[in-house]
Amino acid sequence: MNVVVLIGRILFAALFLGSAFGHFAQRKQMAEYAGYKGVPVPELSVLASGVLLLVGGLSVLLGVWADLGSLLLVVFLVPAALLMHAFWKESDAQVKQQEMINFNKDIGLAGAALMLFAFFSHVGADLGLTLTGPLFHI
């Protein structure tokens, strides 16, 4: 079972680590798009969200306080869904549909990250193939 959880952590974290790389490598373009979407202080927001993605993704991947890392991903995903994919503000049907897909993806991933938080916090040190146990114990 430990190997299955490790494979799941790798697959889950890969999405966020790739996105973190994009936040840093294309910071200017992402900040312009975030500003267009109405995100406050877009340059700082892109940098801060990149840090959340990087730290949360690495935490889950490496199993270093993976419960905390999961919560950091939720802290990124919910505001990203609400601010960047506000489909209810769109009038063009195609744009609205694409934003709704991205909104639902982010909310679904936030739900998965919350489940990982509970999983890591509950299983604790019994879960092998991690560098540390959980920070929280529920």
Image (cartoon, helix red, strand yellow):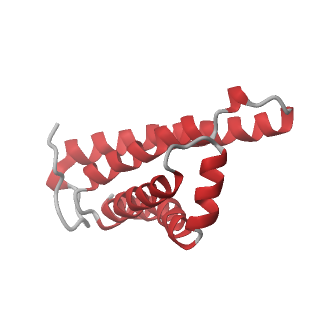
Image quadrant containing the N terminus: bottom left
Q: Residue furthest bottom?
A: 25
Residue nearest the observer in this picture, 117 or 51: 51
Residue 41 in the image: x percent, y percent?
Answer: 49, 49
**Left or right, 29 with reference to 47:** right
**Rendered location of residue 85, percent (x, y):** 64, 39
Q: Which of these two is toward me, 118 or 102? A: 102
Quadrant of the image containing the C terminus? top left
> Where residue 8 sits: x, y (%)?
43, 58
Instruction: Judge left or right: residue 87 versus residue 13.
Output: right
The single residue placed furthest to the top in the displayed view is 88
Which residue lies at the image location 46% right of the left edge and 40% below the top edge? Answer: 110
Q: Which of the 4 image quadrants contains residue 105?
A: top right
> Which residue in the rendered view is the most extreme toward the front?
41
Rendered residue at 55%/66% (across/down): 27
Given residues 83 and 133, the one toward you in this image is 83
For this view, does 138 lie left or right of residue 35?
A: left
Against 118, residue 15 (above or below) is below
Q: Is residue 101 above or below residue 7?
A: above
Percent across and percent down for residue 82 are 55, 34
Q: Is residue 79 above or below residue 29?
A: above
Name which residue lies at 41% across and 56% down.
48
Q: Residue at x 39, y 61 (%)?
A: 51
Q: How many marks?
A: 0
User: What is the residue that sits farthest to the right in this orientation?
Assistant: 93
